[in-house]
Amino acid sequence: MQISSRFTIAVQVFACISTFAEEHKITSDFLASSVNANPVVIRRILQQLKGAGLIQVTRGSGGAAIAKPVETITLLDIFKAVECVDGDQLFHFHENPNAQCPVGRNIHNVLDGRLENIQKVMENEMSKVTVADIIRDTSKYIENENR
């Protein structure tokens, strides 16, 4: 299993907005240059973040801005905004395990609760990290580079 790069790109978007908003207009082209990705990918992610109420996007001369206090936005909020998780289930189970096989007949009993717990732990950890934490740590690394 691998979470798509949309999540880490979205986190980087927040760090870029915070770092550069005073000196640059935050456009999809500008963000794409930081991420080293196609601006179309960035625009899709910006729309998802906007749809979740996490950023504001003003067309034309406005650019992107963070819509809420960064202390209130968590990695879980960003994950839920940009990752397409069916029915809030991180793990997708194959549709038809063979009921004639003793393993196939019981695999849901064996895995369902465990996978649900794994997802809860991941979501709990993601909810502990805020965009403010990411911005603070990014700033520290940038300051260390400039020494």
Image (spheres, rainbow, N blue to C red):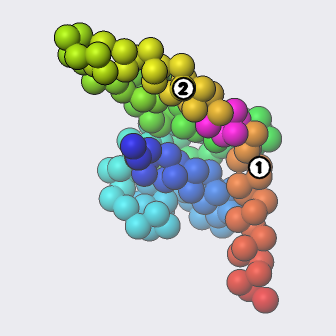
Q: Is residue 125 magenta?
A: yes
Identify the magenta region.
122-127
Q: Residues within 10 Å of mark 1 (few under 14, many from 20)?
A: some
Q: Is residue 51 above or below residue 106?
A: below
Residue under the point 47% across and 42% down: 46
Residue 48: say if magenta. Answer: no
Inspect the image, locate mark 1, and give the three-letter code of the amino acid beneath it: Ala
- Tell me: 22 left or right of 4: right
Q: Is residue 101 above or below residue 119?
A: above
In the displayed structure, would residue 142 be above or below residue 24? below
Q: Amino acid at mark 2?
A: Arg
Residue 67 x %, y %: 67, 36
Q: Which residue is mark 2?
A: 114
Mark 1 = which residue? 132
Q: Which residue is more in the foreground, 1 or 99? A: 99
The image position of residue 104, as x and y in percent, is 28, 19
Compare residues 134 and 52 and report the one nearer the observer: 134
- Residue at image position (36%, 56%) is 39
Q: Quadrant of the N terminus?
A: top left
* Element assignment for label 2: helix
